[in-house]
Image (cartoon, rainbow, N blue to C red):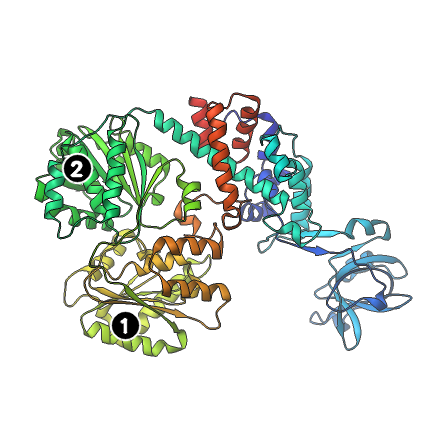
């Protein structure tokens, strides 16, 4: 990133410039923390080891970590170089003896490190075996002159396989030594009120905890660092939003004629939430600045109809609208929902995806360019160069988190002052909405359309698997369709796949091969779509059970599916379980969701599954999920496009987030370009947390 203040350059050097980090270790460090020196500085300890306790050998209690000063008395290597037996070294002082044991040890190394007749300081956990004190593989062996160096509280960092804690500590200590002196970006009155230390001091405290209280999220040093990160997030979003607001728009007003025809053709009246949201959208469209609004609505709350009515305002005003969707199958479903409604008001709608080729594609492109098509629905294909609109006024993006911000902007560039409506069916807690979508206004559809039946949710022990399969057989023979979701296996797609394939084999053997389809993340797009389409289709001989990994979370509408089975439900997050349950209960028949769990459950897992049983309100579920699991876990941050925080824990620091939002409004109210002395320090903060979009906004004015 250009123009970063030179004072920060050492922090953005590669981590392999630090001692002990060669090419092999660098890969592990990058995977664990990140590629730069600053990433190691943000990598805070998660626990600690207290090595200050230094009794005599005879007083060293079992099970405790002790730092002992001992004389080395004798070496006993394993007989006949039998590597399965330990190498033993007898040590002691005037109060007793202790045996040090080393497995797979190199004798010559041990003789150099612990020479007989000399005194050494050792630190590690005391164990008692056959009445004898032992210490297996001491954590430290040093000369008596170095005792003070190891006799301290030692931070313990989150680690990854293959990386040694000593290497990590050494690298982090070296990284801390190059911390530059930076101008303070926080308000002095605020720092005084909250008793927060300076930035470098807070980092020093965080990396050198003195006791368990120093690891708590509400420790003043950790609060200060979390606040810095949250402030950079809120400031970045506010700057991007201010720039978006400066972009002028056309005031759009429709005459309501097309809308009237569509609402008259609906078999139900709009809910209060839908009417309220349309009012908010209409006010945005009629205004001078561009609309950038997030529409959050639970599965089945009627977002698509709201999006259509918003798009019709553009058509009534003589323009066009686009609806961009992450997958082809979802785009097809939107088309099926919207075609009859558009027919009712005489509006031409078309579909475009990467798979539409040749003449068919050319026809759609020329009709869009000439303005014969008013509403274009499609996938990523919509923002490709050859797609030209006659006059695009509104762009709607569904499941925004599957697209990057730049893709949103590319679509907006297809017209002049294009208004944006972004939709998501993932209920997001209010605090997370602030961190991810602070650059947007937010509307919520918090009512279900009339006629939706509640889903009967039950918790079932996995031991009752045979009964569950019997229930599936009964459901299928009565004409129902069934989803069977296989367990998530941490960080491993291959074992997710293995679980799904094994369950598919079992069910195919039990119900018949033609009755059971399989969908998983490793399948190619067309194969996945074909399996989903076969399950969703009306063929009486088609599959009735769909075994899947979580690829079915978003979108697909199969009204005949009335049973959802989630295997190992305790491994899923609440928001994910809620998304999965939302796949059923879409028709007029009663639906059942069976959450199969492996006993015994942890307290958190029990609480999570009970919440699923008690409520179907996605927003309540999302807030509870945040409380139970913390922000990074909710929605599985990696897939959700939500920012991942290194220092802030949104469950603990939600108050700090609101404070950061208010502080941001005050800062930009007084100094919108960040030109004052504090403004310059805040620019450094944005660079420190790599808030690229905001920095480019500042630079481009």
Q: Which of marks 2 and 1 is nearer the N terminus?
A: 2
Left of 677 or right of it: where is 296? left
Residue at screen point 21% across, 30% down? 392
Q: Residues within 10 Å of mark 2 (few under 14, many from 20)?
A: many
Q: What element carries label 2?
A: helix
Residue identifier under label 2: 312
Residue 395 image position (x, y, % from top left) = 25, 36
Residue at screen point 70% across, 65% down? 104
Q: Nearer the viewer, residue 39 or 498?
A: 39
Vertical relation: 463 (above or below) 488: below
Residue identifier under label 1: 508
Q: Nearer the viewer, residue 633 or 441?
A: 441
Residue 514 image position (x, y, % from top left) = 21, 69
Does residue 50 show up?
Answer: yes
**What is the spatial separation of the Cα atoms under label 2 and label 1, in whole angstroms?**
47 Å
Q: Which of 275 and 515 is in front in this view?
A: 275
Left of 648 or right of it: where is 398? left
Left of 30 or right of it: where is 380? left
Q: Is mark 1 on a helix, strand or loop?
A: helix
Q: How many marks?
A: 2
Does residue 303 show up?
Answer: no
| Of labels 2 and 1, the one closer to you | 2
Residue at screen point 46% across, 56% down? 491
**Residue 585 lies in quadrant:** bottom left
Residue at screen point 58% across, 47% down? 29
**Residue 398 lies in quadrant:** top left
Vertical relation: 505 (above or below) 445: below
Q: In which quarter of the image is the C terminus?
A: top left
């Amino acid at each position: 990133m250009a123009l970063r203040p030179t004072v920060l350059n050492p922090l953005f050097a590669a981590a392999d410039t630090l001692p002990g980090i060669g090419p092999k270790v660098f890969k592990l460090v990058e995977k664990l923390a990140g590629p730069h020196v600053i990433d190691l500085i943000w990598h805070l300890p998660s626990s600690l080891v207290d090595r200050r306790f230094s009794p005599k050998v005879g007083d060293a209690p079992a099970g405790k970590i002790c730092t002992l000063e001992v004389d080395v008395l004798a070496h006993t290597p394993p007989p006949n170089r039998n590597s399965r037996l330990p190498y033993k070294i007898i040590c002691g002082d005037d109060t007793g003896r202790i045996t040090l044991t080393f497995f797979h040890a190199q004798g010559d190394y041990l003789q150099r490190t612990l020479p007989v007749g000399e005194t050494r300081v050792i630190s590690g956990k005391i164990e008692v075996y056959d009445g004898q004190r032992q210490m297996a593989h001491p954590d430290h062996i040093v000369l008596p002159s170095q005792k003070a160096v190891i006799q301290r509280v030692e931070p313990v960092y989150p680690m990854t396989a293959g990386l040694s804690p000593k290497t990590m500590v050494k690298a982090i200590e070296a990284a801390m030594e190059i911390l530059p002196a930076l101008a303070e970006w926080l308000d002095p009155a605020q720092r005084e009120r909250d008793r927060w230390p300076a930035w470098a001091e807070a980092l020093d405290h965080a990396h050198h905890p003195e006791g368990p209280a120093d690891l708590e999220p509400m420790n003043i040093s950790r609060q200060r660092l979390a606040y810095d990160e949250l402030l950079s997030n809120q400031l970045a979003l506010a700057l991007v939003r201010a720039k978006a607001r400066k972009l002028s728009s056309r005031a759009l007003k429709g005459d309501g004629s097309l809308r009237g025809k569509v609402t008259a053709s609906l078999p139900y009246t709009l809910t209060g939430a839908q009417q309220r949201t349309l009012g908010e959208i209409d006010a945005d469209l009629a205004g001078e600045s561009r609309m950038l609004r997030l529409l959050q609505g639970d599965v089945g709350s009627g977002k698509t109809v709201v999006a259509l009515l918003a798009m019709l305002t553009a058509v009534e005003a003589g323009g066009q609208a686009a609806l961009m969707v992450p997958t082809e199958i979802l785009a097809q479903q939107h088309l099926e929902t919207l075609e009859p409604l558009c027919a009712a008001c005489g509006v031409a709608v078309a579909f475009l995806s990467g798979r539409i080729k040749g003449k068919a594609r050319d026809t759609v492109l020329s009709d869009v360019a000439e303005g014969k098509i008013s509403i274009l629905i499609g996938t990523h294909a919509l923002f490709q160069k050859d797609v030209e609109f006659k006059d695009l006024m509104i762009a709607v993006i569904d499941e925004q988190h599957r697209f990057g911000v730049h893709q949103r902007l590319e679509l907006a560039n297809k017209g002049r002052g294009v208004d944006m409506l972004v939709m998501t069916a993932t209920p997001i807690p209010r605090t997370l909405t602030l961190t991810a979508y602070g650059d947007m206004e937010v509307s919520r559809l918090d009512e279900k359309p009339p006629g939706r039946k509640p889903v009967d949710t039950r918790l079932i022990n996995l031991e009752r698997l045979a009964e569950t399969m019997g229930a599936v057989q009964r459901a299928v023979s009565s004409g129902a369709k069934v989803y069977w979701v296989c367990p998530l296996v941490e960080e491993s797609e291959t074992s997710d796949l293995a679980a799904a394939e094994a369950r598919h084999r079992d069910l195919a053997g039990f119900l018949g091969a033609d009755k059971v389809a399989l969908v998983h993340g490793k399948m190619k797009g067309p194969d996945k779509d074909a399996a989903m389409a076969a399950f969703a289709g009306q063929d009486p001989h088609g599959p009735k059970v769909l075994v899947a990994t979580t690829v079915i979370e978003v979108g697909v509408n199969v009204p005949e599916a009335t049973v959802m089975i989630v295997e190992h439900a305790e491994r899923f997050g609440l928001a994910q379980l809620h998304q999965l349950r939302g796949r059923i209960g879409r028709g007029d028949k009663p639906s059942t969701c069976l959450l199969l769990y492996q006993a015994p459950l942890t307290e958190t897992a029990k609480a999570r599954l009970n919440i699923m049983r008690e409520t179907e309100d996605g927003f309540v579920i999302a807030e509870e999920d945040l409380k139970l699991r913390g922000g990074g876990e909710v929605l599985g941050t990696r897939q959700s496009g939500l920012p991942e925080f290194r220092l802030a824990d949104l469950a603990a620091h939600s108050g700090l987030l609101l404070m950061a939002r208010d502080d941001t409004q005050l800062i930009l109210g007084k100094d919108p370009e960040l030109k004052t002395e504090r403004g310059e320090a805040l620019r450094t903060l944005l660079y420190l947390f790599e808030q690229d979009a905001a920095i480019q906004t500042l630079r481009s004015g």
